[in-house]
Image: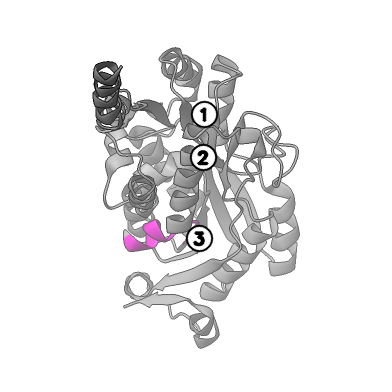
Amino acid sequence: MRRRDFAIGLLLAGAPHSVPAQAQQAAKQHRIAIVIPAGSVARIDDTGSRFWQAFWKELRGLGDVEGRNLSVERYSGEGRPEGFANLARRAANRNPDVIVASTEAIARAARAANPSLPIVWIGGDPIQAGFATSFAWPGGTVTGVTVFAGLEIWGKRLQMLKEAVPSASKVLFLTTRTGVANEQIFQEAGRRLQISVIRTPLQESTLSEIQGTFAEIAQEKPDAIMVSDIGDLIPYRRLIVELAERSRLPAMYPWREYVEAGGLMAYAGDFDELGRRMADDVHEILKGAKPGEIPIYQPTKFELIINLKAARELGLTIPPTLLGTASEVIE
């Protein structure tokens, strides 16, 4: 009896050391797929992108580290909407734990490819897109963050542009054919400000299409342009800013990254916070949460950024009243 008790004691003494080792070897490996609508997949790892920089930093801080316990596959639609469905199927067929989707078009294609796959998305109005029944309780397979702060924000952007360019009476709105139309709010704001706003959709979000569209814009001879906040255009922000400057067109942009690339002005939400919130949602789903129970984040803080160097190159004098409301002025 003593000999047997001694042997059992030895086995029990070794058990606490062996279990963690086995558990560590069997650590759960998660897989996510990130799908963007346009540009190179290298943009997802671009340290110059505030959004993606914040996304990866937050994810690592939460313990989800690529190459350790996380596998990441990256996909781009290369600006061609007709290929989004096949792209989403490719991503879904790899059976990721969650798909990170940029824009409504990509999220919609991902949901169609596999209706049960969790999706963390960034885009416009989730209720209008049919992704959620409410911001607080999405109820489906899609959650994430929205850049939608009400259509009124476009009226505010137009008003700020009018303050910077008081003589403006014709403004072109650069968007994509998959972008949500803002005609009603533009018509109302346009009547109030005595501005005609003309929607100019790109057929594809590609370099050649943007260049061709700006050639057509030059023939229209507008007084200024506004750029849509749709994610398809962000990879081409430097090109868009360059073409706007070359055309001598004052522009209102939807994200500060355009201003950092040399653009005139932007009225935008906090991209860093959006990236962090997206990472939080991915982490919660990897832990087992259901996307339909994770509230969709909606930004409440917006900032006006003005680039005085760009203003001088355009021969503009920004009024002190507008400068006084700016959160940041770039000299």
Name the secondary structure under disc 2: helix
Tell me the quarter of the picture where residue 12 sits: top left
* Quadrant into which the C terminus falls: bottom left
Q: Which residue is drawn at the image coordinates 64% and 45% (left, top)?
A: 295
Task: Kindly identify which residue carries mark 3.
Answer: 224
Mark 2 lies on residue: 284
Q: Is residue 253 highlighted in magenta?
A: yes
Q: Which residues are magenta?
A: 252-260
Q: Secondary structure at mark 1?
A: helix
The amino acid marked with disc number 2 is: Glu
Left or right of 195, for residue 65: left
The residue pinned by badge 1 equals 106
| 176 falls in the magenta region | no
Question: Which quadrant holds the N terminus?
Answer: top left
189 vs 39, nearest the viewer: 39
**Residues packed near mark 3 inside 10 Å, few (<14), some (14 to 19) or many (20 plus):** many
Give whichever of discs 1 and 2 has the lower sequence position.
1
Q: Nearer the viewer, mark 1 or mark 2?
A: 2
